[in-house]
Amino acid sequence: MKKSDFNYPLPEHLIAQYPLPERRASRLLCMNRDTGELTDRQFADFIDLIDERDLLVFNDTKVIPARLFGKKQSGGKVEILIERIQDERHAIAHVRASKAPKAGTLIELELGHRCTVLGRADDLFQLEFEGGLPLPVLLDRIGHMPLPPYIGRADEASDLSRYQTVFAREAGAVAAPTAGLHFDLAMMEQISNKGVRSVFVTLHVGSGTFQPVRVEDLSAHVMHKEYFAVEPDTVAAVEEARSRGGRVVAVGTTAVRALESASKTGILSAGFGDTDLFVTPGYRFRSVDALLTNFHLPESTLLMLVSAFAGYDHVMAAYRHAVAHSYRFFSYGDAMFLSR
């Protein structure tokens, strides 16, 4: 298939700029992935769509305040988006400036902190941070939440909690696993009380999740890499769910990518490392039976993954339905549940 096959018209006013007051207040578009049948529901109804045989798989990655603002010694403004922390003083990052900084460029940050450009790493920059603070601590002090580019506003204090899942614990993401944003602590307790087991994988969502596919021929697209980890207890829980006739329900495309990356041999196995798995229609899913997800950007790799999971025609029809019925789109938007 071609990139343009995954385009769709989206009125700008449907792109959610803020979360709703309550996490579970979103709408939920349910789709039977076999028939394409659609049902409009509320996210609070999700508890009724799962049972004690099912297994929910969440991504426990934690978004770091990865956006920094500074200036060069010449006075030119600089915006930094940390892509990955390498150690307590070094990171690779996107750097936006009127002119790309060269190796040796000193960048002055807020509260007197500084970093130096060491060199380039393809489209990214290698940075070294000065001072006695470990980089994670420095980010907590002066960093800003890395809201996606389609949210046309600066981050606010509320984004510190709302652009983060209630179960986040493994710091390293620069974008939220957005399907998980709909769950509050009360719903997590409801799930447990119903007897539905939950387990966690980790996939540190990178800024590459927002990078456009630049080639029409999908086979020529180079997928960004993201760190993932799948623990042995998750593998055992998946096996147990299958043995009792339950579904493995992935909460978000990032949970899908983690599980499927750990299933490349054909069998889900514990492991960790970088994944550049690119899922397009025709892919054979090995570890996921149902998917809860938000609505994704036109021509994005995430929309391609969802189309592979539930069928291209079904998914594009669902998106047309969502637009026609004024669903809220993207990170702070509504959700979609795809199941058999």
Image: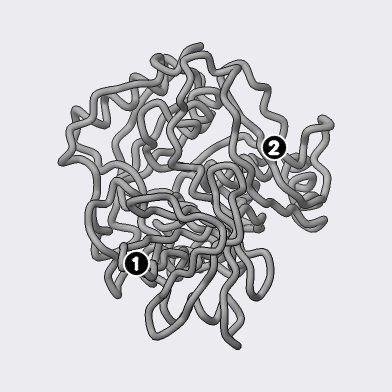
Q: Secondary structure at mark 1?
A: loop
Rendered image quadrant of residue 303: top left
Residue highlighted by disc 2: 260
Q: What residue appears at the point 38 percent right and 60 percent down from the top-left corner?
A: 79
* Colour mapping: one colour
- Label located before the other in sequence (2 or 1): 1
Which x, y percent locates residue 74? 34, 67
Q: Tell me which amino acid carries mark 2.
A: Glu
Nearer to us in this view, 137 or 22: 137
Q: What residue appears at the point 43 percent right and 42 percent down from the top-left corner?
A: 210
Q: CA distance from mark 2 to mark 1?
A: 47 Å
Location of residue 202 with respect to 109 vertically, above or below:
above
Is residue 44 visible in the rendered image? The answer is no
Q: Tell me which amino acid carries mark 1.
A: Ser
Which x, y percent locates residue 197? 64, 57
In the figure, is residue 93 to the left or right of 5? right
